[in-house]
Image (cartoon, rainbow, N blue to C red):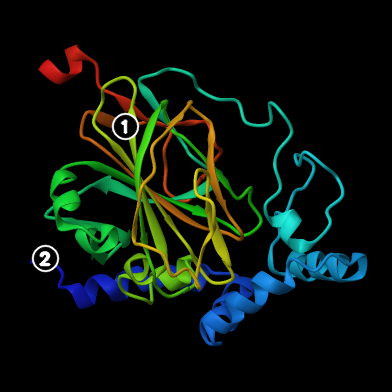
Amino acid sequence: MAPNIVEMRIASAKPLARLTPAERLNFLLTNRLPRRWLTLFMGRFSRIENPLVRALSIGIWRLFVDDLKLGEAAKSEFTSLHDCFIRQLKPGARPLDDDPDVLTSPCDAVVGEFGTVTEGQVLQAKGYPYSVAELLGNPADAERLEGARYVTLRLKSSMYHRFHAPCAGRVRGLRYISGDTWNVNPIALRRIERLFCRNERAVLTLEPETGAPVVTLVPVAAILVASMRIHGLDAPLTLEYEGPNDIALDRKAAKGEELGYFEHGSTIILFASSAFHFDGNLARGTVIRMGRPLLRRRNLTENNE
């Protein structure tokens, strides 16, 4: 007899015991406080260009993370906490797989759930499905993605926050969907249903120059993410944004070219057609770097098997 949804959620909650005290404290502090107020405050506070404030802020940040590494940053001194958040990397820090039939990771991330879009749904965690139509804000777009591959990529706050084109092509559109700013760490994914559909997010459509079906990127904001910057837009996408939801955008992007950045850690969900299969090294819970293989396009021999 198949387990019901309650049993699935109880089973999926068992790994919570393996969360560190720092992760539990992080969830408590970021999801039990006024999230919108805290996010707006952090956006302003992080930009204070004062050596003492900067040093104290980065020092407190290190208390909540154990893997903040700044040696790859293009510069060694930062003007503010914000400047550190959005740091660029030294040239060559992220080798790029240039095979045109490979979709590379758009960002540094921890690999979350991945699989196939089934009956219009995907998973945020085991036993926690959500609707692709609700995520994208457009049922027609969701219908086109039925049977497609999806990968969830979680950018920890300590990671490099910029995201890049997974293939060469044209960015053909952007949809902005206002929402909440829930934390997107593992404990939240197992406690808050439809979390990605609740949070502020953008939907980017990329047409590969190889002629493969479109690739969709969904950057999802989270607690303390004061804004998302999408290159080609004059203004950032923030909680105070009051412009149109569907934004005209048409620009060419080389593979690995920077598309934008978060101002804190968050999540990107990538969708690609069933013409692609997952790279053999992809595994949940592992760290992947920007530019490394994520999905590979099936060749004609594979398609005919």
Measured from the top left, where is residue 65 in percent x and y?
Answer: 69, 63
Of the two numbered discs 2 and 1 on the same chain, state the one appearing first in sequence. 2
* Residue name at image x 55 percent, y 25 percent: 96
> Which residue is more in the foreground, 90 or 279?
90
User: Quick one: which residue is furthest to the top in this view?
Assistant: 301
Which amino acid is tagged 2? Ala
Measured from the top left, where is residue 119 in percent x and y?
Answer: 11, 55
Question: Helix or strand or loop: what does disc 1 sit on?
Answer: strand
Quarter of the image where the N terminus is located:
bottom left
> Which residue is more in the foreground, 15 or 73?
73
> Which residue is more in the foreground, 3 or 128?
128
* Residue name at image x 60 percent, y 50 percent: 161
Indicate which disc residue 2 carries.
2
Q: Nearer the viewer, mark 2 or mark 1?
A: 1
Q: Is residue 305 visible?
A: no
Q: Is residue 81 visible?
A: yes
**Is 169 left, or right, of 229 in this rendering?**
left
Measured from the top left, where is residue 170 in percent x and y?
Answer: 38, 31
**Is 60 left, or right, of 4 in this rendering?**
right
* Residue name at image x 75 percent, y 39 percent: 72
Residue neighbourhood size for the residue with mark 2, other residues' Cα within 10 Å, grouped as few (<14), some (14–19), many (≥20): few
**Mark 2 touches mark 1? (CB < 8 Å):** no
